[in-house]
Image (cartoon, rainbow, N blue to C red):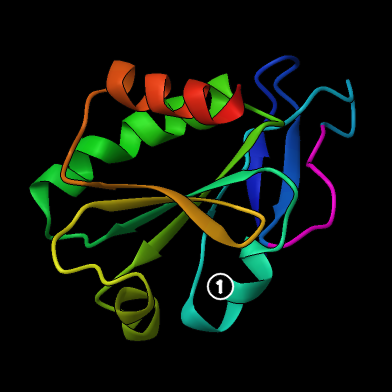
Amino acid sequence: MSSITTCPSCSTKNRVPVASAGRPQCASCHQPLPWLVNVEDADLDAALKTNVLVLIDLWAPWCGPCRMVAPVLERLSVRYAGRIKVVKVNVDNNRRASARFDAQSIPTLVMMRNGATVERIVGAQTEPVLAKRIDALLA
């Protein structure tokens, strides 16, 4: 499973895999690509196996705050290309993931490194707040 993303550096369209041992880079200019993928329960474990910081967005389409956070996460995936992976999980369609991360309120953002949770944020946050937390985890 993969998605198509446009390289922020050269505008080339690239296929970005849900799961990969490395980090996606542009086929044309070789710059790091934003890594934002939609994941189902069946693909979640594979999507979490990476050597970059993973930000899991547990959301639902009917949730207003979730829709407010979505463009923020898209911008952060571009800003931190090559350093983070954003994994979006629709809790309505993926009950196992919702239970696994105890998403009692959405949006719930879970940040993981090497399979362990390092940060958990419940509720919509602004881009500067999320960027500050990501910066601290990447330091």
The residue shown at (68%, 71%) is 46
Q: Is residue 55 above or below residue 50?
A: above
Q: Position of residue 112 (x, y in %)?
A: 53, 52
Q: Position of residue 82 (x, y in %)?
A: 72, 31
Q: Which three-letter amino acid code belongs to the residue tagged 1?
A: Leu
Magenta stretch in the rendered image: 19-25
Q: Position of residue 8 (x, y in %)?
A: 65, 19
Please name whichever residue, 135 or 19, is drawn nearer the observer in this view of the structure.
135
Disc 1 marks which residue? 44
Q: Main secondary structure of the magenta part?
A: loop
Q: Is residue 16 magenta?
A: no
Left or right: 40 as drawn, with respect to 66: right
Q: Is residue 11 above or below residue 125?
A: above
Left or right: 42 as drawn, with respect to 12: left
Label 1: few (<14), some (14–19) or many (≥20) C-alpha neighbours in 10 Å: many
Q: Position of residue 106 (x, y in %)?
A: 17, 57
